[in-house]
Amino acid sequence: MDLLKEVIVIVTPSLMVLFIGFYLIKYQIETKFNRHGVEPMVGPRPRPHVNFQAYERLVLYLERINPSNLALRMHKPGISSKMLEAEMVKSIRDEFEHNLSQQIYVSDDIWKLIKRAKEETIKLIGIASSKCDDKSTGTELSRIILEIASNVEEFPHDVAIRYLKKELREKG
């Protein structure tokens, strides 16, 4: 019994000092954070700039599918017009699929504009390709795409970019 009393007499003050120290340190940390206008981090925090990154990626996608940029970027010497057409359409679709998840960060109207830009760009490539014969080169297809593009006042991708910027300014 004497041993139990001795353990209680020794352990009780130690535990009290431990708890008091813990609460004093916790109080000092909370006070310091509150003084600087910062809340202590408890649990996971949302990642900042996720929406900004989505808007950036979608603008990049739209710029990459701009018919003029696409024709210059995808052109390879010696490639046939049919092969270039197929590669351009594949590139547009692959990049679109790669960016599908970004739709959760933008409005439905913006997403419709992005899909329309994709579809219209594919149509423009098809129109340009229909003006080529079986022996046409990729250079000829690129020239026709650039020619058509120079006659269009405003592409759907330009409209989509403008609305993406507007929506981002409203959110930010």
Image (cartoon, helix red, strand yellow):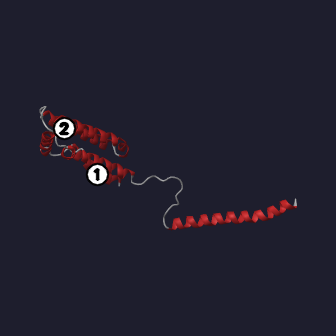
User: Which numbered tag is attached to residue 128?
Assistant: none
Residue to which mark 2 is pinned: 125
Residue to which mark 1 is pinned: 166
Instruction: Please determine whether, in this image, residue 51 is positioned above or below residue 11.
Output: above
* x 30%, y 39%: residue: 94
Image coordinates of residue 108 in percent, x first then y, are 33, 41
Task: Specify whether 137 is left or right of 23.
Answer: left
Image coordinates of residue 139 in percent, x first then y, are 14, 41
What type is the residue that disc 1 sits on? Lys
* x 27%, y 40%: residue: 91
Indicate the quadrant where residue 127 lies.
top left
The residue closer to the viewer here, 119 or 3, is: 3
Task: Specify whether 75 is left or right of 26.
Answer: left
Instruction: Please determine whether, in this image, residue 38 is positioned above or below residue 158.
Output: below
In this view, the residue farthest toward the right is: 1
What type is the residue that disc 2 sits on? Ile
The crowding category of the residue bearing disc 2, from other C-alpha atoms within 10 Å (few below 14, some 14 to 19, many at least 20), is many
Image coordinates of residue 60 in percent, x first then y, are 28, 49
